[in-house]
Image (tube, rainbow, N blue to C red):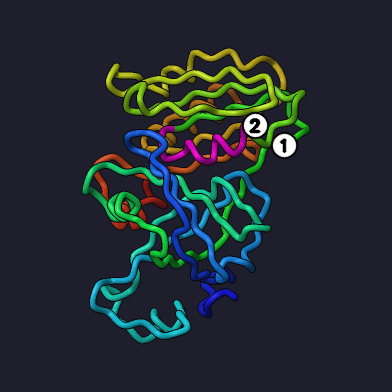
């Protein structure tokens, strides 16, 4: 069963690490399971996500965990920190959730945790959230993002029908960060690298997306997403209702700082 504490109608699930796998030098796969995740229900979106709650060291929380009670009774600096991760896979029969987590040395919160995670480590996950899935009634799909969007893009590619077509542009640090991507669709998948000075905005500007209806998923660094939103809406005239755009992070900002300014920056 889920722990108590529904924020925006989303329960908190208690599980534990089952196993981990390093996919690339900077991406670690963490599989979570346990009885507490047995009631988790995937929402059907390919950008389905959960928020992992990281307790503040030295702070005692109610048992069973109740996020609403925590926020009502403890000062803000004692609330658990949250990081958002795409559900890369969900196996309801095994009761397992797979999360692919970026690691940049000892920087940040989630990355260092994932690098040290071991079977049996406890996890608190709130969710699910999400809003995007590839539609069947469009002519073409555009999927653009950096490492932070890679799990959702990989899941979207796997969900595409065999008769679908897609243009996929991905930015990672270097060739070692590439992953094998599977799809039944006819997909033009190209990787670019920061070490080469790649610019996703300019690359997308030069794409030929055909004359039909395009559904687009553009997620990753906020500046890139904001620039491409303007390009896709104003220069290409894409239907706003067919665009999924989100700045997952912003260069030079911590996760907490970015959440505070995200609404104004992306307006």
Residue 215 circle label: 2
- Magenta residue check for 264: no
Residue at position x 34%, y 57% in the image: 260
Sort mark 1 into few (<14), some (14-19) or many (20+) by Cα contacts within 10 Å.
Answer: some
Q: Does the residue at mark 2 contact the one at mark 1 (Cβ under 8 Å)?
A: yes
In front of the other: 78 or 12: 12
Identified at 61% across, 49% down, the residue is 131
In this rendering, the count of numbered labels is: 2
Q: Position of residue 186 (x, y in %)?
A: 67, 19
Is residue 222 visible in the rendered image? The answer is: no
Q: Relative to 210, is 14 on the left or the right?
A: left
Residue 247 seen in the figure: yes
Residue 13 — which label?
none
In the rendered image, the vertical position of residue 76 relative to residue 188, given as above or below: below
86 or 181: nearer the viewer: 181
Residue at left offset 57%, top offset 57%: 96
Q: Where is residue 69 in the image (x, y as percent from the top left)?
A: 43, 84
Q: Where is residue 98 in the image (x, y as percent from the top left)?
A: 52, 50
Say which of 5 and 231 sits in front: 5
* Left or right: residue 38 compared with residue 147: right
Regarding mark 1 in the picture, which secondary structure is present there? loop
- In what quadrant of the picture does the N terminus appear? bottom right
Give the magenta-colored segment's residue range: 146-157
Cα gap from disc 2 to disc 1, whole angstroms: 8 Å
Q: On screen, 260 above or below 172?
A: below
Q: Is the magenta stretch mostly helix, strand or loop?
A: helix
Q: Tell me if residue 258 comes above or below residue 223 in the rendering.
A: below
Closer to the chain start, of discs 2 and 1, is 1
Tell me, for residue 135, which label it has, or none: 1
Q: SS for tag 2?
A: strand
Camera-nearest label, 2 or 1 = 1
């Amino acid at each position: 069963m889920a722990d108590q504490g529904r924020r925006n109608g989303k329960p908190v699930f208690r599980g534990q690490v089952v196993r981990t796998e390093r996919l690339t030098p900077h991406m670690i796969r963490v599989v979570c399971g346990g009885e507490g995740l047995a009631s988790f229900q995937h929402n059907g979106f390919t950008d389905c996500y959960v928020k992992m709650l990281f307790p503040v060291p030295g702070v005692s929380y109610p048992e069973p965990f109740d996020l609403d009670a925590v926020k009502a009774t403890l000062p803000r600096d004692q609330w658990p920190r949250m990081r958002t991760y795409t559900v890369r896979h969900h196996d309801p029969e095994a009761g397992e959730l797979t999360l692919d987590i970026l690691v940049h040395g000892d920087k940040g919160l989630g990355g260092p945790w994932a690098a040290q995670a071991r079977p049996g480590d406890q996890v608190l996950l709130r969710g699910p959230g999400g809003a995007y899935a590839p539609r069947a009634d469009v002519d073409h799909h555009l999927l653009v993002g950096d490492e932070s969007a890679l799990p959702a893009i990989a899941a979207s590619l796997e969900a595409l029908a065999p008769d679908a077509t897609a243009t996929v542009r991905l930015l990672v640090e270097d060739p070692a960060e590439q992953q094998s991507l599977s799809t039944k669709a006819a997909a033009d998948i190209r990787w670019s690298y920061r070490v080469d000075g790649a610019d996703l905005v300019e690359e997308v500007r030069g794409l030929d997306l055909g004359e039909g209806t395009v559904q687009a998923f553009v997620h990753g660094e906020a500046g890139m997403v904001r620039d491409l939103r303007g390009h896709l809406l104003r220069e290409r005239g894409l239907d706003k209702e067919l665009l999924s755009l989100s700045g997952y992070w912003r260069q030079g900002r911590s996760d907490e700082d970015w959440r505070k300014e995200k609404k104004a920056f992306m307006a």
